[in-house]
């Protein structure tokens, strides 16, 4: 709490104590915090103490003696709106939380926007076993993957999911919810259904093997090749392209363009209070109607599988300014290749990706259909990842361009060798997650992540702004300012300051209304 707003008032009170003591004739009294050499009550309330209270008081007395002779430093002023918002949204955590023991000096990345200037430490990562969590959440069907770091919920609409979800979410850890897509109307999400409804429309496609745009292609051709290698569009060398339809629909509102699918999705989304547009914990919904609402989706991400290309991604490493939930609606296995050979290749890719043994066991279960391979990293590790990617770029003879960012540029995929270097040189280990048919993956704001489709996947993502990650949303907006003017992320498309302002305004209004109701009830009881 050393930099919290409350501590400002503590400093004022302590400075008054100091002036009073300095005006006295006793030099020994001037070195103490209060009367009789004891710390002031306000300092005692605001200081984080260990179990041995007396020993901490002794340390404070000695440190105060040495510091009292130094000239006092002026308190930094909150001059700008950014400072005020930053001061409000930062989280206070226990001082007992230890810093990363593997402190790595970054030599190839310099942060232009220092969002850690307040000295706040994030909550520690939680690692659980089923034996421990069963005692805490006895009624919630769940398990743990990624060696106890990844929560997997088994019933997407269970009424008690929210508590265990929030305990992970506030620590910046992703969550996977199984069984979500199984409740969808499957006929709406099959390739044949999209080909029928939108086959004549034309869209730009992306070749995942080259990142080149394939412009103005009829969607009928894209869907015909979805589960048939022989019907796919070919490149200039005559090779079938691994195509992706990204961020679709690009401009139109999903709810207006695909109303039946929108209603079907909203009906089954887990953690509805977070993920629905009007959810009470989706702060983006606090913007008044007079504002142009930020485009938080849903958006569809449809791509062919790239299981034969271990160094190529369906979506390169990047991070999002808001939280997101990504639902696997359909997994299509190619029909013109040998099924057993295809599955052997898929399982080998999963085994080579660093997945834990429980994940590897899960994807071999008969009822599971593995679709996509994710690697998600903690937001706190983003700068270490940047440092590695810049180091590798220099090793490969590339020039680091100013006002560019190796994560925001979405030009890297962390393949096996790069993930190994990241662990050995920076002690950074992410979450290797296999998204099977029906799984919903929750990705916290600011968490670097990448996706490689092992099979042909139809996925849909909904963005939201949670109270737990509003700090990351705000700081990412400030960070984006340092990108080039032509960068797609340069502008604040989320309107995060407006969201924070109106969320706080609504909260204060609710508190005042609650207070008025309480006073009214007290008056009625008094009159009766």
Image: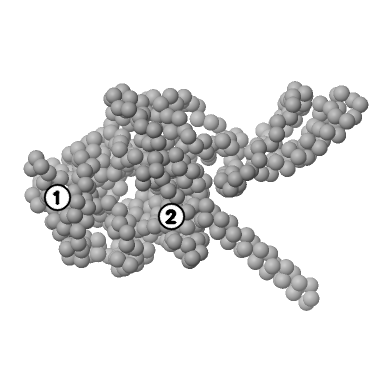
Asked whether residue 44 is in view, the answer is: no
Q: Which residue is mark 2?
A: 464
Residue positioned most to the right: 25
Work out which quarter of the rendered image holds the C terminus and state it.
bottom right
Q: Is residue 15 left or right of residue 93?
A: right
Residue found 21% across the figure and 47% down from its top: 213
The colour scheme used here is one colour
Residue 100, percent from left and from top: 50, 30
Q: Residue at x 47, y 54 (%)?
A: 495
> In which quadrant of the rendered view does residue 16 lie?
top right
* Picture layout, residue 288 above or below residue 144: below
Q: Is residue 81 visible?
A: yes
At horizontal 58% and vertical 56% (from top left) the residue drawn is 504
Nearest the viewer among 320 and 190 is: 320
Q: Is residue 341 left or right of residue 462?
A: left
Residue that numbered label 1 is attached to? 334
Q: Residue 91: x, y in percent?
A: 57, 44
Q: The residue tagged with tag 2: helix, strand or loop?
A: strand
Q: Residues within 10 Å of mark 2 (few under 14, many from 20)?
A: many
Residue at 30% over, 62% down: 184
Number of marks in picture: 2
Report the front residue among 183 and 133.
183
Pointer 2 or 1: first along the chain: 1
Residue 271 appears in which quarter of the rendering? bottom left
Residue extending furthest toward the bottom: 528
| Label 1 crowd (10 A; few <14 / some 14-19 / many >=20) | some
Nearer to the camera, 404 or 269: 404
Residue 37 tag number: none
Secondary structure category for the residue under label 1: loop
Q: Is residue 46 left or right of residue 101?
A: right
Alpha-carbon span between mark 2 and mark 1: 34 Å
């Amino acid at each position: 709490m050393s930099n919290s707003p409350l501590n400002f008032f503590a400093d004022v009170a302590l400075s008054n104590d100091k002036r009073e003591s300095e005006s006295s004739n006793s030099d020994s009294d001037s070195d103490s915090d209060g009367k009789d050499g004891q710390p002031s009550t306000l300092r005692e309330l605001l200081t984080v103490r260990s179990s041995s209270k007396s020993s901490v008081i002794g340390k404070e007395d000695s440190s105060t003696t040495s510091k009292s002779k130094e000239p006092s430093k002026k308190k930094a002023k909150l001059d700008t709106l950014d400072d005020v918002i930053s001061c409000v949204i930062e989280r206070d955590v226990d001082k007992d939380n230890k810093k990363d023991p593997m402190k790595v000096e970054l030599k190839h990345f310099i942060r232009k926007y220092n969002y850690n200037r307040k000295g706040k430490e994030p909550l520690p990562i939680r690692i659980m076993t089923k034996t421990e969590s069963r005692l805490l959440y006895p009624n919630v069907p769940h398990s743990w993957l990624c060696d106890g770091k990844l929560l997997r919920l088994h019933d997407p609409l269970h009424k008690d999911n929210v508590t265990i979800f929030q305990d992970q979410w506030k620590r910046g850890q992703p969550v996977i919810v199984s069984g979500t897509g199984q409740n969808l109307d499957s006929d709406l999400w099959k390739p044949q259904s999209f080909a029928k409804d939108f086959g004549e429309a034309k869209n730009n496609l992306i070749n995942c093997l080259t990142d080149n745009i394939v412009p103005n292609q009829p969607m009928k051709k894209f869907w015909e090749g979805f589960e048939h290698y022989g019907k796919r569009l070919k490149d200039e060398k005559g090779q079938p392209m691994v195509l992706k339809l990204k961020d679709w629909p690009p401009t139109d509102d999903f709810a207006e363009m695909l109303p039946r699918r929108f209603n079907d999705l909203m009906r089954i989304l887990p953690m509805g209070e977070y993920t629905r547009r009007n959810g009470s914990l989706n702060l983006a919904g606090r913007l008044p109607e007079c504002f142009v609402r930020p485009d938080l989706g849903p958006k569809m991400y449809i791509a062919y599988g790239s299981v034969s290309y271990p160094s190529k991604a369906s979506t390169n490493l990047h991070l999002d300014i808001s939280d997101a939930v990504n639902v696997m609606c359909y997994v299509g296995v190619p029909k013109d290749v040998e099924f057993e050979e295809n599955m052997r290749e898929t399982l080998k890719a999963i085994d080579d990706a660093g997945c834990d043994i429980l994940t590897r066991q899960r994807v071999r279960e008969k009822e599971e259909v593995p679709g996509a391979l994710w690697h998600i990293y903690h937001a706190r590790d983003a700068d270490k990842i940047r440092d590695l990617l810049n180091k590798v770029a220099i090793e490969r003879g590339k020039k680091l361009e100013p006002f560019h960012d190796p994560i925001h540029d979405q030009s890297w995929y962390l393949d096996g060798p790069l993930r190994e270097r990241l662990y050995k040189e920076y002690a950074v280990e992410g979450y290797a997650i296999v998204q099977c048919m029906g799984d919903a993956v929750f990705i916290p704001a600011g968490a670097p992540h990448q996706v490689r489709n092992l099979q042909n996947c139809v996925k849909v993502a909904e963005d939201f702004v949670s109270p737990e990650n509003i700090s990351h949303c705000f700081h990412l907006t400030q960070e984006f300012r340092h990108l080039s003017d032509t960068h797609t992320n340069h502008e604040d498309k989320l309107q995060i300051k407006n969201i924070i302002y109106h969320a706080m305004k609504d909260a204060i209004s609710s508190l005042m209304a609650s207070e008025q109701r309480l006073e009214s009830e007290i008056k009625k009881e008094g009159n009766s």
